[in-house]
Image (cartoon, grey):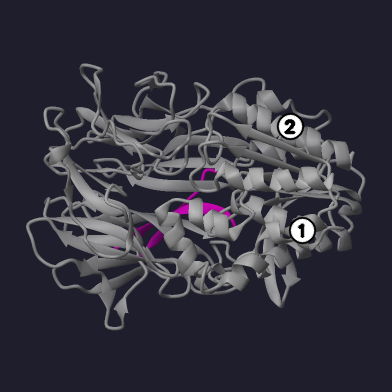
Amino acid sequence: MTQPLDVEQLIRIPSLYPWLGYSLSPDGARAAVVWDKSGQWQIYLASTVGRGKPRLLAPSPESQMSPVFSPDGKQLAFTQDYAGDENYDIFVHNLASGHTRNLTPDTPGETINPAVSWSPDGQHIAFVSNRQGRFAAYTLRADAQYPKRTVRRVTQHDYSDALVDWSPDGQYLAVTALARGQEMWLILVPLKGGQERIVGGPDGPVDARQAVWSPDGKRIAFVSTSTGLNSIFIYDVATGELHPVETPRRGVSAQYEAVQPSWSPDCARLAFTLNRDGNVSIGVKDLVKGMLRHIQVAPGVHQWPRFSPDGKHLAFLYDGPRHPTDLWAVSLSTGRTRQLTRSLPAPFTGNEFVAPRVVRWQSDGLTISGLLYVPPRKRKPLPAILYVHGGPTAQSQNAWAAPVQHLVSLGYVVLAPNYRGSTGYGRAFQEANRFDLGGGDMRDVIAAAEYLVRQGYADPKRIAITGASYGGYLTMTALTRHPNMFAAGSALVPFLNWFTEVANERADLQYWDRQNFGDPVENADRFREYSPITYIRDIVAPVQMIAGAHDPRCPASETEQAAALLKDMGVPHEVIIYPDEGHGFRKVHNRMDAYRRRAEFLKRYLG
């Protein structure tokens, strides 16, 4: 890499949306994918057997998510929000006529989660909504002749529902709900009446997420942290018995987590992903012989494996530091892989980009990991940037990250820390910042900066920090609590005031915050102490804040209240609020503008 990459050209590289981003047709011949090839997330139909170009399905000025084929393959359900507000509507597209219907119009203030599930007969769609206050599971008729009065609520508990999956025999809904702390519970809801059943063992409910029914409807595979690491279990619906499938063991070289299970059509195999320090491969487990097979295109992140209807192939998403996310397939007999969508355009080859390496440092006696990107052929020490992920229950992985590649091409060392609270390292580590959000995790980020200096990578006078969402919160926390450590900071879609954040965010987010941070009245001292707004007058470094006007997670008012104080203080600052965006920027022109402005801002103070 000899020349800086052009940020606008780089951000224009399309990529498939990785979360609930594709669906295989019942005959396996087509895949519906979410792709930003048009400049924002839209649904495309791609062939899994031929070589034709993917076709844009239902063009819209708004972002579309979570395509799901109907059981007969004749229709496709998907969700769409408006200017990033996350108040999704459910649409059904007739693949023969090309007609698209909105099943949930005129629902102001209602938030529908983007993932939906068809009934086996194709007559109903299950979804999660806050239409009656708390997030709960509902069903509605998929026929356009039926108005909203056909909507039926099917869960009545006090937990916050998140995902729903219809059983193959049509008798149950498997509902995943946030119950307590960071535990998700799997609740079986009989649709013909009867008591809800929470999946658990002799000690009570178990943490259970990413539930998928076996094709015969007799079992459910799910992910649980009950062993301490994310592991795959099977639940027998008839007997209530739990059986472990893949239970990782701890060890420096062997530790990994298993997530995202998927059944083979004959119910004899399970595919899932294996996460080792942010590199994610695929495992296929023979449930009879107990043999585990590993599949990998290259180092990077493989996600959401799904069997073809004949069980001979496996589809999955793959991305890496040199490859944007695309849909791939592998023959399970020959091991030959095939790329089904192609996102990386000419003149890029992938060799322009830098692959990170895993580094570790100590913080409060804990070993913290991170991904370190070092510009090639550059003499150290260099100006450095801490790139802090959001969540906090997320992980910086060895994935496609165009904004990071741009910063590295400008000559900056970039370190993406996986602070306590991150996923991928076990339940204890993931929950290590409960009721301490902005405390120990911030110290892990500060220790990352100290590591860069200690190892000779970074010029201690030229270190900046940036992050989005919770990463934006930690950015502002670091700038206020360690004001002399950073030359500049850029916070994207941040929050700064725990009181106003909890008061103004969506109900399911309030539920999570109360479970993991506390009550704003009972724990007012904690809310005050951990709010960057409390210490904002200590900021000395120039700061940039970028937000979306329709953000339901970290409202733009969080940025606005901080901007007013910074202006009064006379601290160099820059504020950008996009009027047509929410939490994260869906439109490519806004993404290009935001990342260009961030790079220019950091360059101004780092050189």
Residue 597's disc is 2
Q: Residue furthest top?
A: 97
Q: Nearer the viewer, residue 201 or 90?
A: 90
Q: Residue at x 87, y 58 (%)?
A: 484
CB atoms of marks 1 and 2 within 8 Å: no
Q: Position of residue 253 (x, y in %)?
A: 60, 68
Q: Name the residue type under label 1.
A: Thr
Q: Is residue 393 visible?
A: yes
Q: Position of residue 92 (x, y in %)?
A: 25, 29
Q: Residues within 10 Å of mark 1 (few under 14, many from 20)?
A: many
For discs 1 and 2, the disc positioned in front in the rendered view: 1
Q: Is residue 358 visible?
A: no
Q: Quadrant of residue 187?
A: bottom left
**In this picture, is 201 found above or below 26?**
below
How far is the residue under mark 1 from the one under mark 2? Answer: 22 Å
Residue 480's disc is 1
Q: Nearer the viewer, residue 207 or 586?
A: 586
**In this picture, is 55 found above or below 177?**
above
Among the two numbered marks 1 and 2 on one chain, the one whose residue lies closer to the N terminus: 1
Q: Please, what secondary structure does the residue beneath circle 2 have? A: helix
The residues colored magenta run 277-297
Q: Position of 315 compared to 544: left or right?
A: left
Q: Position of 492 compared to 607: left or right?
A: left
Q: Nearer the viewer, residue 405 or 38?
A: 38
Q: Please, what secondary structure does the residue beneath circle 1 have? A: helix
Q: Residue furthest left?
A: 192
